[in-house]
Image (tube, rainbow, N blue to C red):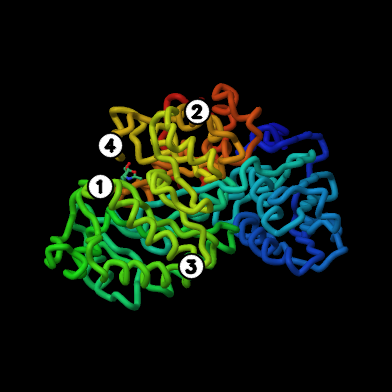
Amino acid sequence: ADSSEMENLVPTPVDVKSSKADYTLTENTVIEVRDGEATEVAEYLAGLLRPSTGYELPIVEGPSTGPDGSISLRLASDSSAIQSQGYRLQVNSDGVQIRASEPAGLFAGVQTLRQLLPPAIEADTEQSAEWTVSGGRIRDYPRFTYRGAHLDVARHFFGVETVKQYIDYLAQYKVNHLHLHLTDDQGWRIEIDGWPNLTDEGADSEVGGGSGGYYTKEEYAEIVQYAQSRFVTVIPEIDMPGHTGAALESYAELNCDGEKRQEDTGTNVGDTSLCLDKEVTYEFIEDVISEVAEMTPGPYLHIGGDEAHTLSDEDYNDFMSCAIPMVIEQGKRPIGWHQILGADPPEQTIGQFWGTSSDAPEVAAAAEEGHELIMSPATDAYLDMKYNEDTELGLDWAGYTPVPDAYDWDPAGYIDGVDESSIMGPETALWSENIRTLSDIEFMLFPRFPGVAELGWSPEAKTDDWDEFKHRLAAQAPRWNVQGVNYYQSPQVPWP
Ligand SMILES: CC1=[NH+][C@H]2[C@@H](O1)O[C@H](CO)[C@@H](O)[C@@H]2O
């Protein structure tokens, strides 16, 4: 195979040594596991390779490498040798070996193996190709343990199948957290038993007046399970006290004037808030937080906190001093958009930075006090920003984000005075004011998303050169073509 496959990986690994010892899969190739734990990843790998190769690729308990070699997945016994979420991958003429200290590392190695095979591997029907894996060895592990991608399912609702495809794109580029923005002015998208009107009334529309929708608890569980099988942690966001129009439309008592709010199919922000003077408001958020926590196995719960413009800082801070302890009581770590840090919350509260300037002294001060940050600067990581003035889809309040800009930043260096130790990692955001379909999602995500995924995974020293990266990014296109991804063919990328 063209050894450039080893040189073209996205995210680029810590250490790559290509060689001429390629391995070619045949119908006799087996997938070999030694530990029960590796079987789940083996099944996933088989699911990737069987359709396009047409090979049986049986999963066998090793040690057994059939006559034509094997793809061997193994959890290293001396797990200390391989960093968390990391892996070692070796390709030689008798097969492929992937080693890791935990299943998540094997899964990351499988995503790399995927890119060492010809693009036709992505087809879901049998292709006649030579299934040759580039020879060499790779040592790899992530710079940040947290790599996230946000999806706004409130402005426009996206069903379970679309969310699963979104999760598959995250996995393909080693992103391991999915932040679902479940509630806003235009829709409430998650069933809450104690407050049924939230979805009976608050879910039946969306921006532009479409039919909206919501996830039943079973559907949410299906999303969580699917994400877990791709080593992706789901982070639900219930935005409060602002961006609560759908709740205010569903329950009159949540409004200070006792009147239900009108259904909102527009895109204004900042003009709604729960009624902080009413006891029922705190009963409401407590019920919601506990039900959402109960259906979320991951360690985080996001309570938004952005753009509560109708409230004074003091009222906002008082609200947060009630809401945040409720999240902690449920055994979850609270996350909020970075304004939440102004409420001087408990130290374990995480701020998600969505600013547009490196000059953010209050965020830097909060980091100094021990708060961790998720980095989503709107100038670089907001993939709802248009590429340029000709882009139909998306918004432009933070300016345009052409492909190079989504790559040309550093999650640890963005905010002046913040140390890398305070940064959990980058997270892309995709707000859906005018993003309606999976095809729209793909157009905004690709080709910018893989670049941010690389910033989260690869060593800093290997992610500071757009002129080097753009060639590796371009080399991903043949895979996207086979996958049918509707990507923006930016003139700034040297497509093959
Ligand atoms: C955290 C945050 N609050 C606002 C802001 O980001 O911009 C988004 C559009 O880019 C918008 O949808 C969202 O409601």
Label for residue 392?
Answer: 4
Residue for point 33% across, 32% down:
398
Whether ligand 1 has any atom under 8 Å from the Cβ at mark 4 is answered as: no
Q: Residue 145: percent from the left, percent from the top?
A: 62, 47
Q: Residue 345: percent from the left, percent from the top?
A: 45, 51
Q: Disc 1 versus disc 4: distance between alpha carbons?
A: 36 Å
Q: What amino acid type is highlighted by mark number 3?
A: Glu
Q: Pointer 1: residues within 10 angstroms few (<14), some, or many (20+)?
A: few
Query: Which image quadrant shows ligand 1?
Result: top left
Evaluate if marks 4 and 2 touch, with contact meaning CB atoms under 8 Å apart: no
Q: Which of marks 4 and 3 is in front?
A: 3
Which of the two discs, 4 and 2, labels the residue nearer the N terminus?
A: 4
Evaluate if marks 2 and 1 touch, with contact meaning CB atoms under 8 Å apart: no
Question: Which residue is denoted by mark 2 in the rendering?
Answer: 416
Q: Disc 4 versus disc 3: distance between alpha carbons?
A: 44 Å
Residue for point 78% across, 39% down:
135
> As rendered, which of 152 and 420 lies closer to the eye?
420
Which of the two discs, 2 and 3, labels the residue nearer the N terminus?
A: 3
Question: Which residue is denoted by mark 3 in the rendering?
Answer: 329
Residue for point 39% across, 41% down:
443
Q: Disc 3 versus disc 1: distance between alpha carbons?
A: 26 Å
Q: Disc 4 versus disc 2: distance between alpha carbons?
A: 34 Å
Q: Disc 2 versus disc 1: distance between alpha carbons?
A: 27 Å
Evaluate if marks 4 and 3 touch, with contact meaning CB atoms under 8 Å apart: no
> As rendered, which of 279 and 351 lies closer to the eye?
279
Question: Tag 4's secondary structure?
Answer: loop
Question: Which residue is denoted by mark 1 in the rendering?
Answer: 312
Q: Which of marks 1 and 4 is in front?
A: 1
- The image quarter containing residue 453 is top right
Q: What amino acid type is highlighted by mark number 2?
A: Asp
